[in-house]
């Protein structure tokens, strides 16, 4: 379990401000397991994609579309989990474990209510996709998959809340190990259920859905047992009086979580729109876009993990009303993210062709064109790495001080009023094509980073 000495434990009295070195080690201790668990979470999607790709192209197309549908609904609902990180860290910083328990319980309530609300969308995804212009056969396969895997929204969002709670408690290593175990189990279940190994029936796409749902449930149960009954956390009695309504905490978590969810959907929508517009340009451009975006997304997990650690550190300092600790921790977190960004930019610029070529079959007649486009997009991705790091770090810090509504407005403005129009204008009227589209993404991220960083540093927050 991860413990960080610079913060006082509840009730232990005031502590001297943490030094820069203490902040450095504390953020690494929190952030590295979170980075690993984020990477492992991505690995669940990657293993599904690879293994269904081995099974059949139609099934692969269906799971890609199904995963995209599930994900956009999931990231909105996960706003309550991100709210838990900031609120629980603040409560613990002020020594109030009761408030930490209340906020987490109501986040679980909100997650369950949200899951019920979106189930009709997942259950009737076929007709919805057909209305959006998707082919009948593909829509039917997606619906078949989501009528099983869609039930995973319940355990997935509960798991997200518990990940947030355990992160705020500075128990990030258990989150990492449980997520890694989930990847291993997912591969095994896929191998058995998709292909019909070990005497099991060959279920194909439905087998992947059953495997995903099973892993979500097992992961949820494991984190519930640890968070509620682990020796070092049992005294918090997280699930005590779980069914008792708590209107005050319910409203407070909802007020913080809904803007976070909308912020995440705004950013996700930017990249979804970029894929749609890239498809207007051509299939090869869209494939190259997907490769560059996959590489950028993997790197983003570094910044995302550090941002979550920054939320915990900022929340603890905010709860303790320690402005010096808040600012020192912010400087160290931003510096670490900047360092990661510089390393990434260097890698993207120094060896773009080998990186892109990892995703391309050299025997494909369009391989050379695909690699050439992918390298160009990766050069722009290198440009916006620092912008992307800035915006996600600022978001993490602002969530730590429980500021979410204004960042939501900034996100919508940056991504939908600046980013998407800039991508369209640069790609089409100005004739820059796919590179112009990526430059528009960079513009949106740059504006978001500047606005959110300015907001955090222009206020005292204590």
Image (spheres, rainbow, N blue to C red):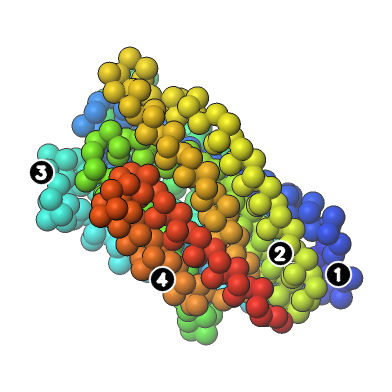
Q: Mark 2 points at which residue?
A: 330
Q: Name the residue under label 1.
A: 17
Task: Name the residue furthest bottom.
Answer: 248
Q: What element carries label 1?
A: loop
Marks 2 and 4 sit apart, C-alpha to C-alpha, by 24 Å
Marks 3 and 2 sit apart, C-alpha to C-alpha, by 51 Å
Select label 2 or label 1 by which is in front: 2
In the rendered structure, which disc, 4 or 3, sits on the residue that comes first in sequence? 3
Local packing at callout 2 (Cα closer than 10 Å; few below 14, some 14-19, many 20+) is many
Left or right: 281 with respect to 400?
left
Residue 230 coordinates in the image, percent (x, y) = 67, 54
Residue 51 coordinates in the image, percent (x, y) = 36, 28
In the rendered structure, which disc, 3 or 2, sits on the residue that comes first in sequence? 3
Marks 4 and 3 sit apart, C-alpha to C-alpha, by 36 Å
In the rendered structure, which disc, 4 or 1, sits on the residue that comes first in sequence? 1
Q: Mark 4 points at which residue?
A: 413
Select label 4 or label 1 by which is in front: 4
């Amino acid at each position: 379990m991860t413990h960080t000495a610079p913060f006082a434990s509840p009730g232990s009295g005031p502590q001297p401000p943490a030094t820069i070195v203490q902040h450095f080690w504390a953020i690494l201790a929190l952030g590295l397991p979170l980075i690993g668990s984020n990477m492992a979470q991505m690995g669940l999607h990657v293993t599904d994609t690879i293994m269904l790709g081995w099974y059949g192209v139609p099934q692969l197309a269906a799971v890609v579309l199904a995963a995209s549908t599930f994900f956009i609904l999931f990231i909105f609902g996960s706003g309550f989990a991100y709210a838990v990180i900031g609120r629980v860290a603040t409560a613990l910083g002020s020594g109030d474990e009761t408030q930490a328990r209340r906020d987490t319980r109501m986040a679980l309530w909100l997650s369950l209510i949200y899951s019920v609300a979106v189930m009709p969308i997942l259950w009737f995804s076929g007709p919805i996709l057909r209305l959006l212009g998707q082919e009948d056969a593909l829509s039917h396969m997606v619906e078949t998959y989501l009528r099983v895997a869609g039930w995973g929204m319940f355990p997935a969002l509960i798991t997200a809340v518990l990940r947030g709670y355990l992160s705020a408690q500075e128990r990030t290593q258990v989150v990492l190990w449980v997520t890694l175990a989930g990847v291993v189990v997912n591969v095994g279940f896929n191998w058995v259920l998709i292909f019909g190994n070990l005497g099991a029936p060959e279920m194909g796409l439905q087998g992947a859905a059953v495997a995903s749902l099973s892993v979500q449930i097992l992961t949820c149960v494991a984190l519930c047992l640890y968070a509620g009954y682990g020796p070092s956390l049992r005294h918090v009695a997280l699930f005590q009086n779980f069914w008792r309504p708590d209107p005050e905490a319910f409203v407070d978590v909802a007020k913080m979580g809904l803007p976070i969810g909308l912020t995440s959907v705004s950013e996700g929508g930017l990249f979804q729109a970029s894929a749609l517009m890239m498809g207007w340009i051509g299939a090869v451009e869209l494939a190259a876009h997907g490769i560059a975006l996959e590489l950028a997304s993997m790197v983003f997990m570094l910044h995302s993990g550090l941002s979550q650690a920054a939320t915990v550190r900022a929340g603890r300092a905010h709860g303790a009303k320690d402005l010096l600790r808040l600012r020192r921790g912010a400087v160290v977190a931003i510096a670490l993210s900047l360092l990661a960004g510089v390393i990434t930019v260097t890698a993207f610029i120094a060896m773009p062709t080998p990186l892109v070529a990892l995703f391309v079959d050299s025997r494909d007649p369009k391989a050379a064109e695909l690699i050439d486009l992918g390298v160009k997009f990766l050069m722009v991705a290198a440009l916006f790495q620092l912008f992307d790091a800035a915006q996600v770090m600022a978001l993490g810090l602002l969530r730590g001080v429980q500021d979410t509504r204004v960042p939501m407005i900034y996100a919508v403005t940056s991504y939908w009023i600046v980013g998407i129009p800039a991508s369209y204008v640069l790609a089409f009227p100005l004739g820059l094509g796919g590179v112009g589209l990526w430059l528009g993404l960079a513009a949106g991220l740059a504006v978001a980073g500047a606005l959110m960083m300015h907001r955090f540093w222009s206020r005292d927050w204590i």
